[in-house]
């Protein structure tokens, strides 16, 4: 509205100056039309620049089935396919960069990437620190995971033992919320495979991971791990995130596209592809 007022004022001043200098009404009208045409061209060029923008989206390296490299050396997963479907629906271009969890967050915070999609749980702590989330696109619980031959079957069985977690995740938060109550310690890792391996090697008695990721990793990776019943969190949604208000356009497109791909069945097909 402020921009429109300034434009109207400039147009009025132009007309006044022209008529005040002896220009005819027709000449003044032509000059005003020329100014308006110039403004329209500038607006069109701005729109075209926005349409031509390639958004940089950061993600994790291995967070199966949401992002990972398959046997054909293709980077695939639920997050990858959801982003591709939304971009096609909304007509925007993007470059997906597989950086790792910590590096992906740092890239968005530093303005080197515009957005993050990496199975990021929507939680108040992140919102308070500057994360701006989309609507939730997947609801997940976090669960404790133990060795295939483990006798651990409840939180009480963790007393005096160590639990592996992944840095900055909802799983780490879940473990931290219970460690004092149940008397266990925590070791932090930067990626999921290393965390799993710590349990397989017996250095930690359990790890904490998002339930769907763990279920798929055990099945497809034939990991000697298992998920005990009753050791999961209440759950929370994953969200796409930006950390700069100037990227709100990207977030708005993600939300609009998410609604559309859910409505036309694309979203459900993507989940079925990786989870069934």
Image (spheres, rainbow, N blue to C red):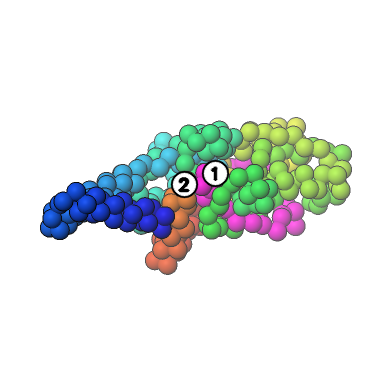
Instruction: Report the front residue among 19 and 200.
Output: 19
Q: Position of residue 23 (x, y in %)?
A: 15, 52
Question: Few, some or many C-alpha atoms within 10 Å of disc 2 (few <14, some 14-19, many ≥20)?
Answer: some
Residue at 23 percent across and 54 percent down: it is 15
Q: Residue 243 carries which label?
A: 1
* Main secondary-structure element of the magenta-colored stretch: loop
* Labels 1 & 2 near each other (Cβ < 8 A): yes
Which range of residues does the magenta coloring cover? 222-245
Say whether residue 72 is left or right of residue 100: left
Q: Residue at x 53, y 34 (%)?
A: 110
Circle on res. 130? none
Q: Could you tell me which residue is drawn at 59 percent across and 46 percent down? A: 131
Question: Residue at left 52%, top 38%?
Answer: 108
Q: Decide if residue 10 is on the left or right side of residue 57.
A: left
CA gap between label 1 and label 2 equals: 8 Å
Image height of 70 relative to 156, above or below: above
Q: Where the N terminus falls, by quadrant?
A: bottom left
Q: Nearer the viewer, residue 242 or 143?
A: 242
| Position of residue 37 measured from the top left corner of the image (x, y, whole percent) | 21, 52
Per the image, the residue denoted by label 2 is 247
Is 230 colored magenta in this rendering?
A: yes
Q: How many marks?
A: 2
Percent across and percent down for residue 168 are 66, 40
Asked if one can make out residue 22 in the rendered structure from this viewpoint, the answer is: yes
Indicate the position of residue 222 as horizontal and vertical percent values.
Answer: 58, 42
Q: What element carries label 2?
A: helix
């Amino acid at each position: 509205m402020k921009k429109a007022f300034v434009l109207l004022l400039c147009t009025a001043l132009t007309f006044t100056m022209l008529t005040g200098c002896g220009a005819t009404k027709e000449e003044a009208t032509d000059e005003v039309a020329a100014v308006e045409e110039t403004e329209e061209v500038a607006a069109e060029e701005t729109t075209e620049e926005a349409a031509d923008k390639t958004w940089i989206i950061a993600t994790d390296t291995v967070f199966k089935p949401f992002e990972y490299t398959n046997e054909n050396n293709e980077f695939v997963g639920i997050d990858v396919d959801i982003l591709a479907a939304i971009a096609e629906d909304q007509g925007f271009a993007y470059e997906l960069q597989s950086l790792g969890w910590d590096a992906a967050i740092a890239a968005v915070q530093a303005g080197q990437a515009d957005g993050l999609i990496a199975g990021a749980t929507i939680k108040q702590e992140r919102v308070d620190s500057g994360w701006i989330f989309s609507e939730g696109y997947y609801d997940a619980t976090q669960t404790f995971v133990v060795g295939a031959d483990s006798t651990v079957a409840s939180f009480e069985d963790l007393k005096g033992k160590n639990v592996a977690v992944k840095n900055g995740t909802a799983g780490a938060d879940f473990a931290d919320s219970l460690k004092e109550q149940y008397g266990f310690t925590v070791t932090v890792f930067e990626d999921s495979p290393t965390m799993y391996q710590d349990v397989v090697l017996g250095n930690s008695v359990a790890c904490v991971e998002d339930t769907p990721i763990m279920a798929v990793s055990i099945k497809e990776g034939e990991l000697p791990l298992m998920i005990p019943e009753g050791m999961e969190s209440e759950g929370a949604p994953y969200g796409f995130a930006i950390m700069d208000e100037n990227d709100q356009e990207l977030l708005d497109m993600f939300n609009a596209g998410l609604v559309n791909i859910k409505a036309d069945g694309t979203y459900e097909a993507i989940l079925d592809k990786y989870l069934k």
